[in-house]
Every structure is written in C-alpha cells, then in structure tokens.
Amino acid sequence: MNGTTLRTGLLILVGLVAIALYASIFIVQQTQYALVLRFGAVQSAISEPGLKFKLPLVDNVTYFEKRVLDLDLPVQTLLSADRQNLEVDAFTRYRIVDPLRFYQAVGSIPLANQRLSSFTNSAMRNVLASASRDAIVRTERPQLMDRIQEDVNRQATSLGIEMIDVRLTRVDLPNANSQAVYKRMNTEREREAADLRANGNQQAQTIRARAEREATVIRAEANRQAEELRGQGDADRNRILAEAFGKDPEFFAFYRSMQAYEAGLKGTGTRLVISPDSEFFRYFNGSVSRPNGGAPSTPAPQPAPAQ
C-alpha cells in the first residue's frame, strides 16, 4: 500500500513539474517581438527568436509583429495653395522598432493605426496646403511625399514605430469639379470636331468644284472632238455620195428612191393616197433608161395592191 501511494505521489509530482515546465516555456518566432509582463509590468523585451522561459502562472507574454505593416487611409479632401479642392487617397508602410515603447505608448496595432492615421492626415494637410495642384499631381509629387514621410516619422518615433513609406495613390478633383472639367473638355472636343467638319466640308466642296470643272472641260473637249469627227464623217459621206452621183446619176436616183420607199412604206399603219403612175412610183412602172446610152434597166416588179 505504501509502495502504491509512493508511486502515485511521484507521478503526481512529475505531472506537476511537467505542467510547470510547460507553462514556463514560450517560443518567439523570427517575425515577432515578445514582452514578458508580470502583473502588467514589463519584465523584459525579447527581439531574438528561440525558446524562452518565464515564471509560470505569474508572467504573461505579449507578441508584436516584427514585419512591415500597412495602413490604408480613407479618402480625404484637402485644399491646395491655389485654392483647389483635391481628393487624396494615401497609404503608409511601417514597422515596430521598439516594442517596449510601442507597448507603453499604444499597446496594440489598432490603436497604433489610429494614431498613425491622425499623424498622416495632419502631415498631408500641412505639406499639401503649401503646394499647387500641378505640383501635387505632376511636378513635385515625389518631393512632397518625402516631406510627408519625414513629418510622420518624426511623430511616430514616440510610438516606437519607424515609417517605411508614405504614398499618395490618387489625387483627383471632387466629383462636382470633375463633372465641370469633363463638360469643359467635352465642349472643347465638340468645337474641335466642328472645326474639322467645317474644314472637311470646305475641302470637299473645293474638290467637288474642281472635279465638276474638269468634267465640264472633258465633256466640252469630247463634244468638240465628236462634232469634228461627225463633220468629217458627213463630209466624207457627202464626198462619197457626190462621187457616186457623178459616176452613175441614175443609180444614185434609184438608191435614193429605194430609201424613200423604205421610209414611206413601213408598216406603221400610215395610209398613202397616191396615184400609181405618179413620179413617186416611177421605178415600179415601166423601164428607165440608163444615162450615157446604157442598156435599159430591168423593170421592177409590180408592187402589191396597197391596203
């Protein structure tokens, strides 16, 4: 019985020792700071990683990030030196360099973010209020961000914080000003478009007038050449007819009579009241002697009775 009680007591003692040993050990990661607190008072600040010891049930350990932290600031409206309202969106990057001072000043990262937001907003108002809109947007933006970072870093040192970077992500006009600028730009673009259309219409009219003038000249030249060719053709025709008439007047008269028959006796429904022995039908009645003592021409066949 005594042996069993002794073993039980030893087991209990070993368990208590194990629990006490477990409660007195804590691990600090490479990305962490650690503060050992005893009844709220800081006993030690640990920045090196590894296995550490503390008094069990008495000491508590608070961890803080050693890595770079970020803080996105809400959009705020600022007034520049040239009296222009600007909407500024910014962010900051920082890290804790003194965990003891950080714990004593703010105690937690959310409270540190609130303090840093206040510091950054104040620094942006002070720095940007002395610069024009063009300097903030284009010409001096890097220098202004460096000045803001220096100002914030000087205030954040009291919190055990080092500012890594402060950047303005967006600097824009308020919505009402943006609409006014958009309308002005739209009006300017419409005016430019109207000028381009007017110039285009003027050039189109010039090109069209030049084309019409050239077309008129070409048509006149073509008509002139056509009249010359037509006159030359008429002259050649008259010459050929005159030569044919001179060689055989009777055949020429016969040929012209055939043309007259063709033109006058077409089936157009026209009725002619002419005597059969009239001069118009002389080649249908009897024979006609050829000039120069030639043989008489062959009598033409009698025409069919007129309808």
Image (cartoon, helix red, strand yellow):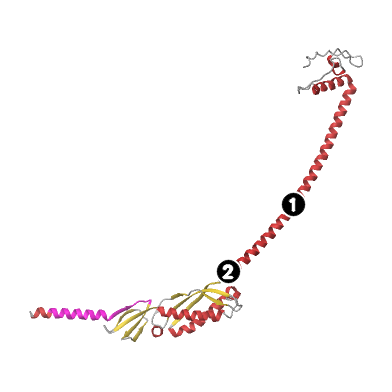
Q: Do the residues labelled 1 and 2 touch (CB within 8 Å)?
A: no
Q: Which amino acid does label 1 sit on?
A: Ile
Q: Is residue 126 depicted above or below 285 in this figure?
A: below
- Residue at x 11%, y 80% (from the top left corner): 5
Q: Does the magenta stretch include residue 19?
A: yes
Could you tell me what secondary structure mostly forms the magenta stretch? helix
Magenta span covers which residues?
7-31
User: Which quadrant of the structure image shows residue 258?
Assistant: top right
Mark 1 is surrounded, within 10 Å at the Cα level, by few (under 14), some (14 to 19) or many (20 or more) other residues, namely: few
Residue 107 point in image, percent of width and height: 38, 82
On the rendered structure, is 222 left or right of 10? right
Identify the secondary structure beneath mark 1.
helix
Residue 178: mark: 2
Q: Marks 1 and 2: which is nearer the front?
A: 2
Residue 300: mark: none
On the rendered structure, is 44 left or right of 268? left
User: Which quadrant of the structure image shows residue 44?
Assistant: bottom left
Residue 80 point in image, percent of width and height: 58, 78
Identify the secondary structure beneath mark 2.
helix
User: Which quadrant of the structure image shows residue 215?
Assistant: top right
Which residue appears farthest toward the right when viewing the image? 292
What separation in Å lies between label 1 and label 2 (alpha carbons)? 42 Å
Residue receiving disc 1: 207
Relative to the observer, which residue lies in front, 53 or 194? 194
